[in-house]
Amino acid sequence: MAGVKRIETDVAIIGSGGAGMAAGIEARDAGARAIAFEKRDELGGAAIISGGGCLIVGTPLQKKHGIEDTPDLAFDDWMRWGGPSADEVWARYYIEHSLHGLYFWAEGLGVKWVDMKPQEGNSVMRWTRAESNGLGLTTRLIDGFRARGGEIVDRTEITALKRANGRVTGFTGANAETGEEVDVTAKTVVVSSGGFNSNADMVREFKPELGNDRVMEGSGRGSTGDGHRLIRAVGGYLTHMDHIWFYVYATPDYRDPAQRRGLVFRQALGNIWVNQQGRRFHNEVLSGGNSASPALLAQTPRHAWAVFDTPMTANMEIADPYYRNGDTVARDKVEELLNNSPFIRKADTLEKLADLAGLEDKGAFLDAVKAYNKAFDDGLKVEPAFNKPLHASKKFDTPPYYAMQIFPLARKNFGGVKTDIRCRVLDRHFEPIEGLYAAGEVAGMAGGHINGRAGLEGTMLGPSIFSGRVAGGWAAQEAGFGDGFAGKPNRG
Ligand SMILES: Cc1cc2nc3c(=O)[nH]c(=O)nc-3n(C[C@H](O)[C@H](O)[C@H](O)COP(=O)(O)OP(=O)(O)OC[C@H]3O[C@@H](n4cnc5c(N)ncnc54)[C@H](O)[C@@H]3O)c2cc1C
């Protein structure tokens, strides 16, 4: 029978993603012993599969491109986008520290910030990408933690927090392969277990309005809400849990036996979306969580069909390792998906495609495509129905045609465990639970709800890493090491 492995440390961390590794680095830099526990066999969580883009203000890259940006401008964009439920204090704290606390700090770990991309809701470009995306960024964090003597215990799922006299004193769990139990005693604990969007049941629990409509799991595979459960069990307060960020350019992964996971597709820029009635409902170029997602969620039923002709599929990418050979797209696998997924219809004529997709009003669908094609015949730059710019699109004129069924994909949690500005977990009286910290997506990226209802892109990974640093610094301080996280503001 497997035994119990007893481990003692100063700071014990749950999760090896962006927040966990940043917490570990900070704790080690303060002189504390730090061990991170990861339930999966691969490290890095959602962070390592992410786009690696962070919203950062006042960077050398912005200056190089002549972009004037200030914390005040970014804060205005942030609050306008996220609405009244964004946490102003945490938003300010992150924005004001993003340059020194993330950009330069990460450079010190070997991260290279390589380019920027315009993103919806920003008045200037500030979404800043790390070389090799989330893989490059998170690998540097993992290496940085280990280089400082930090230890990562993988394949070990933490299942309960230990408490004595109201204080969290460690946790217990087990090795997924051997069954060996671990019993960890720590002076302080940082929970950085990510979000819950790879647990569709939990998404439904906090979004009951989804009813029985299909919603796809779309975060890292370890993002199943474990940390929320652990913290709730010791009286931690969960907030804004219904703030879930959906994307819609995704179709079920038919290779997943449970068909719960979704596959995101990109680089099929010309496609149009029609609802089950066969009508377009949105400018497909605005594909973000604050534009396309509410538009799709307003349809009855809550799904749509992304329609392509053959050339539109030529550069299609599927954001999943199965559909890639390293850095290149595995075209044969994309073809395999197009030809085999039960969620994709293929036909030689648009009429037949409408029949195969069961569109309720075939005439409306054919009229929509006709109007779209006419915009090209008329030489328009923008089609009049939804003001979609046409430079990246084309006429529907080359069969076979495809209709891919798309459903809401839960991607990011903008609500979670409520913490104070030191990342101490708060109970329902907003008193800190001694010894317990939370950072990253389990805490709605930082503090509980830093973004509010909507996030400017790059406001998940950046705040997750930053709050990880804050949590690690203060967890070490409570454990008797260092002075806590100080940071250096962007200005002055
Ligand atoms: C495909 C994709 C692309 C993205 N791109 C971007 C982007 O470009 N910019 C951006 O801002 N955001 C992006 N995000 C969101 C961003 O990656 C996450 O918000 C961020 O990684 C959260 O960091 P984290 O450390 O809190 O959680 P994670 O990085 O998910 O790490 C949590 C870790 O905890 C582990 N864990 C969970 N439960 C347990 C347990 N019980 N015991 C032990 N370990 C456990 C998990 O397995 C996981 O490894 C993207 C997300 C996805 C899925």
Image: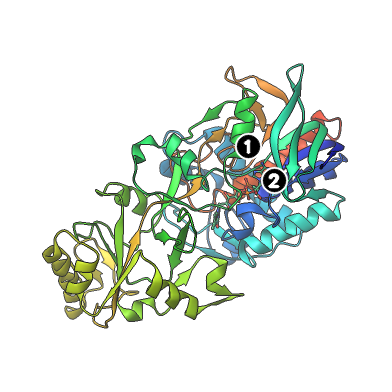
Residue at x 25%, y 69% (from the top left corner): 382
Can you give x and y, in whole percent of width and height, for residue 282 in the image? 27, 57
Residue at x 19%, y 67% (from the top left corner): 355
- Above or below — where is 349 with respect to 166? below
Residue 112 occupies quadrant: bottom right
- Above or below — where is 330 with respect to 60? below
Horizontal arrangement in the rendering, residue 189 relative to residue 366 (left or right): right
Q: Which mark is residue 280?
A: none
> Crowding near pointer 1: few (<14 within 10 Å), some, many (20+)?
many
Q: Find out if the beta carbon at label 1 lies less than 8 Å from the nearest ligand 1 atom.
A: yes
Amino acid residing under circle 2: Gly
Residue position for label 2: 15
Amino acid residing under circle 1: Gly
Question: Is there any visible trace of residue 485 in the rendered image?
Answer: no
Q: Find out if the beta carbon at label 2 lies less than 8 Å from the nearest ligand 1 atom.
A: yes
Q: Which mark is residue 227?
A: 1
> Crowding near pointer 2: few (<14 within 10 Å), some, many (20+)?
many
Tag 1 and tag 2, C-beta contact below 8 Å: yes
Horizontal arrangement in the rendering, residue 287 relative to residue 457 (left or right): left
- Above or below — where is 245 with respect to 113? above
What's the coloring here?
rainbow
Q: Secondary structure at mark 2?
A: loop
Task: Tell which of 177 and 348 is nearer to you.
Answer: 177
Question: Which image quadrant: the N terminus?
Answer: top right
